[in-house]
Amino acid sequence: MTTEESILNKIQILITKHFDTPQEAFEFFDADGDRKLTKREIVKLLKEAEINGFIRGLVSSKLIEGYDKSGDELIDWNEFKAAVAKIKSA
């Protein structure tokens, strides 16, 4: 299993074990309620998914880079859904 697969697997486990739906997870980590996840909020998600602290910042940047289609350096609900769909198919 590659590092990317391992990280995606940990995120999937977090979402399925602790939340009824991906939207519930999104809303939980959207601390300021602006319907977008900031890098800080994504780092919190990664911490909860037990991603090593050393790589959380790098992983959060890569997630934003890979899924931020609007270019605002935030992850909105539709972008989060796309990421979750990729995780489920991995």
Image: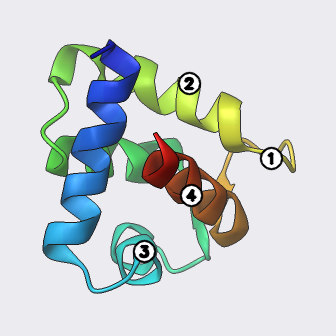
Mark 3: which secondary structure? helix
Indicate the secondary structure of the residue bearing disc 4.
helix
Labels 1, 2: front one: 2
Residue at (36, 67) in percent of width and height: 29
* Label 2 Cα neighbours within 10 Å, binned few <14 / some 14-19 / many ≥20: few
Q: Is residue 10 left or right of residue 90?
A: left
- Which residue has dot 4 on it? 85
Provide the secondary structure element on which disc 1 rests. loop
What residue is disc 1 on? 72
- Would you say the residues marked 3 and 2 are in contact, meaning their CB atoms lie under 8 Å apart? no
Residue located at (87% from left, 50% from top): 70
Q: Amino acid at mark 1?
A: Asp
Do residues under tags 2 and 4 come within 8 Å of each other at their CB atoms? Answer: no
Nearest to viewer (mark 3 / mark 4): 4
CA gap, disc 3 to disc 1?
22 Å
Residues marked 1 and 2 touching at CB (< 8 Å): no
* Number of residues whose C-alpha sits closer than 10 Å to that of mark 1, classed few (under 14), some (14–19) or many (20 or more): few
Q: Which residue is mark 3?
A: 22
